[in-house]
Amino acid sequence: MRRTRVSSRARQSVDAQTLVKLARRLSESGSRLEEQLWQRRLIELINDRLGRRNDDAVEASLDELARSSQPAYDDLADLAESCAESTIVEIEGKPHDTLLLALPLLAWSRYRLPTTTLAPAMCQTIGAHLSGHLLARDARTALADYLFSIDQLPEAFGDVRRQIEQLGDAVVEGITLHIDAKKLREPVAMLADTRYVLIAIAAPQGTPLFHWQESGVDPDSKNDALNAFREQVTAVLQPVMTGCRFRVLAPNAFHSALRFADRELREFSLEAAVSYLKLSYDFAPSALTAAYGVFEDPSGNSGGEVRIGLAKSASDDDVIEGVVWPLLGDDDEQTIDDVDKALKTLSLNRAVAHAHRFPLEFCDDCGAPMFPNAAGHVVHAEPPEEAEDRPAAPLH
């Protein structure tokens, strides 16, 4: 008999409650052995739901724990991410642990940042550098042939699982995974943003994924290996990043890589905005004033952020460029200190920190965020008057 939608919802509700209970018991564990038992049960249930292409129960349980138990939420979120970004594939009759990696790039440009298909030779070269610098002896790899924006990456746990399953199949077949660009959403245009290459790595179950995990290898060799890999990949990706200034970050497991890139992008975006004003209008940092403060949603539906308005020092009323610095769960005071240090590094003429909190306002016409000026008002960022007379200048 065909199951009704009510039965499906009931099953999801039961699964969600089970996940909530198991996560709470995990967070209360007093020993490693007890912890491992709860983890195994949670992993089994999460994998079952992801395998059924239905992660609603996982999302519902996280929503409940976010309101009731932060430790249990953190434990369950960590396991859900781990399950979503990994799978098992069979190669030559042997099971292989397979992990989804993201290779982030921080980039800025006066022109549109690229999202594009990567040439087969470029994918092969990146794969060769992965094997040569990072992977364990028996590990294999496969790439997706696309440079993704953050808007084009999978978001839901189920979508992340499908991505690693597709890349896992590519590892088995020894091919590059082709991405149909027509099926991807159009990225939001930003002065500075992240770009990503998606990679799967697979190794026989229970064996190392990375070179520095192997017996007899110094674990600290990881840092030199990552630096060498980043240097090589920077040169490989240069042709698709024409007109951009970019920095390659270390590849990592999918969710960890995205979080790290989000943090690194904050200061990078500020540096990019100051460089952009110098390049486009010849405004030296010493001629600029920054005003900043914490913006928050009074309803609590959106996360807080620090917004930084940049202006010529002669004007306390205008903002000619703005930067958003998401809090990402950080302490407000620590974040303000970090922003202040970043501004000092850039040698601006003046930095004005507003102690009062601003509402999370956006322009009614274009949807752009509003930024604080030195006078303490929230205004729209507008190009300087010089923009009308100054021709566009190339980046290189």
Image (spheres, rainbow, N blue to C red):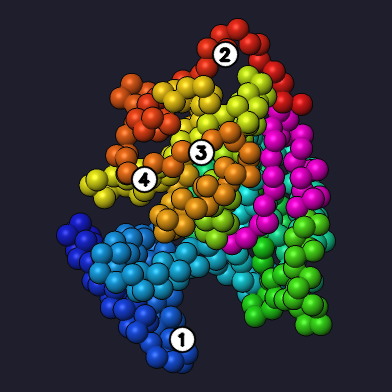
Q: Which mark is residue 36?
A: 1
- State how far apart marks 3 and 2 are (Cα): 24 Å
- State how far apart marks 1 and 2 are (Cα): 61 Å
- State how far apart marks 1 and 4 are (Cα): 46 Å
Label 1 is placed on what type of residue?
Answer: Gln
For the residue pair 339 and 134, the one nearer the viewer reads as 339
- State how far apart marks 2 and 4 are (Cα): 32 Å
Badge 1 marks a residue whose secondary structure is helix
Label pair 1/3, CB-CB below 8 angstroms: no
Label 3 is placed on what type of residue?
Answer: Ala
| Residue on which the image places disc 4 | 355
In primary-sequence order, the first of circles 3 and 2 is: 3
In primary-sequence order, the first of circles 2 and 4 is: 4
The question of residue 239 being in magenta is answered with: yes
For the residue pair 278 and 130, the one nearer the viewer reads as 278
Left or right, 336 with respect to 233, comes to left
Label 4 is placed on what type of residue?
Answer: Ala
Q: Is residue 207 above or below residue 176?
A: below
Q: Which mark is residue 293?
A: none
Q: Is residue 199 above or below residue 188?
A: below
Pointer 1: residues within 10 angstroms few (<14), some, or many (20+)?
few
User: Where is residue 129 shown, x and y percent of the image?
Assistant: 80, 55
Left or right, 59 with respect to 155, comes to left
Q: Which residues are magenta?
A: 230-254
For the residue pair 376 and 386, the one nearer the viewer reads as 376
| Residue on which the image places disc 2 | 387
| Residue on which the image places disc 3 | 351
Label pair 2/4, CB-CB below 8 angstroms: no
The residue lying at 66 percent from left, 21 percent from top is: 282
User: Where is residue 258 shown, x and y percent of the image?
Assistant: 54, 53
The residue lying at 44 percent from left, 82 percent from top is: 40
